[in-house]
Image (spheres, helix red, strand yellow):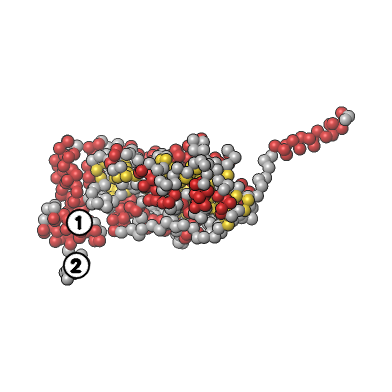
Amino acid sequence: MSLSANRRLRPLLLVLSALALLPRASAAPKKLSIGDAAKEMGNHVFFATGSAMPSNLVPAMRATALARPHRTNVYYMSTFATSQNFDAKVADKWHPNLLFVSPQNRQAAKDGTATLHRASLFNLGKKIQSGEMPIDTVVVRVSPPDKDGYVSLGSAGDLTLMALRAAQARGGRIIAEVNPNVAHTYGNRIKYDELTAVIDGGGILSEHNGIQPGAPEKAIASHIARLVPNRLRTTIQVGIGNSLNGVGAALQQKRKMRIWSEMGSDWVRELMVGDKPAVKEAVFSFLHGTNALYGLAGNNPKIRMATTGEVNDPANIAAQPRMRAINTALEVDFTGNVNAERIGDRIISFPGGQPDFMEGASLSKKGLAILALRSRNKDGGSTIVPKLNGDVVTTPKEHVDHIVTEWGATRKLRGLSDAQRTYEMLRVAHPVLRAELAAAPLKAGLLQQAQFDKLVRSVYHSIRLAPAEMRRDVADEALKRQLVTAEQHAKLIEGLPVVAAPPAAQ
């Protein structure tokens, strides 16, 4: 070839070389039956969070795994998977790895059937990214492709999208149920052609229906609302837990709020609907609620779904203006350390995103880390305790600004001594338990006699200020314990509806 011809071909060769370096379009995913799709899974399978998990694929995959000669590791976050998936009889071949503990898998967490990955969600995300969890398959429910060829993960971003990208990077697989009931949400869309295998689905999405708040929850929410400014740009996060069920309604009259939260449940609808919504923009890592909530997020540019790596990063949380992290727990000690995980040796939950958000909020400019819980547990004992159960600390006291119960909120704990913190904690403990709880700190010198006496006197005043629905039972117990006089008791129940006596036994 002549030199002049070579020169003429050089531009064409350069173009062809550049084209060769461009990523090639993925092949369309295989459309399979449920049984055949199950056979596509690898040995380290991540199931998407909550309603993004295609529950109809799980039994077929479990059956496939049980027929294999080797173990299949399965990674679960918050899940609707049935307890059968965590049975000791299947664990050798279909082995659960728990990133979060929920009612279906608590027994497996306790008896050693499952491998436990106890860490905050932000740190779990880093483990997925690093390959410490060698996930090679992600199983997820997605929307049908849009006009541009993208599907949405709907209610999930969180660890699901992080696991998906990590699996792709090592040549792994994405097995998806394509379901028209999955909302097209922003921030968590991927190309349809990135999926490995798909099945058709049409079932309604799994739902989490929260318990309606009672009088104690409404009282807790009203105390929290006083810690959230109005008409000043403020960011809120709300965790999961029955004690927080009234927060949405209590914040409805606020303005200029935005949401930056790991989870969104139906309290989001209370704040984002109507002519003058309290919240106009929100970022979540996953949604866990009803189909009405999922519908609100669909094609809604005011709601963005993001990964745990973004949403739960304490630095990103700290950057939010006037961040209010609102979480709950099983118990807190006299200095403000938090246990949201264990009752004795029984594992109830894992850290989740609480440590990430409490740390971030405590570092936010004018931010507050708020921990709210009912003052009594189901057995009637105090949730404010001298020492945490089993010494499990989910959130350390350094990352807690206010403790809130149905009886009030502490003053800001940051900067207070342990003695000052103890008094503040006892001030919001259940009224009939305060004197009993205060006896040991008084003896140890953490409380002064004057403070102890004030706590005893506060019993009557706390009950008097309580909502009517809470007053009678507490007043009756206070009288029985001789914490109020008969005259004070009469004043406390004055005007309350008369409770009918139970019918006599026949």
Mark sitting on residue 502: 2
Callout 2: SS: loop
How far across and down, in percent of the image, does residue 112 sit?
38, 41
The one nearer the camera, 108 or 7, is 108
Q: Residue at x 22, y 45 (%)?
A: 426
Whether residues under marks 1 and 2 lie with C-beta atoms below 8 angstroms apart, the answer is no
Name which residue lies at 35% across and 56% down. 246
> Which residue type carries mark 1?
Val
Q: Position of residue 245 (x, y in %)?
A: 36, 55
Residue at (36% x, 43% y) in the render: 111
Q: How many marks?
A: 2
Mark 1, mark 2: which one is toward the viewer? Answer: 2
Place of residue 96 in the rendered image (x, y in percent of width and height, measured from the top left): 44, 44
Alpha carbon distance from label 1 to label 2:
19 Å
Amino acid at dot 2? Pro
The reply, left or right, for residue 317 in relation to residue 489 is: right
Q: Residue at x 17, y 40 (%)?
A: 440
Q: SS at mark 1? A: helix
Q: Residue furthest right?
A: 2
Locate residue 12 relative to residue 344 in the image: left or right: right
Expressed as whole percent of the image width and height from the top left, the position of residue 118 reads 40, 39
Image quadrant occupied by the N terminus: top right
Front-lying residue, 165 or 225: 165
The residue wearing badge 1 is: 474
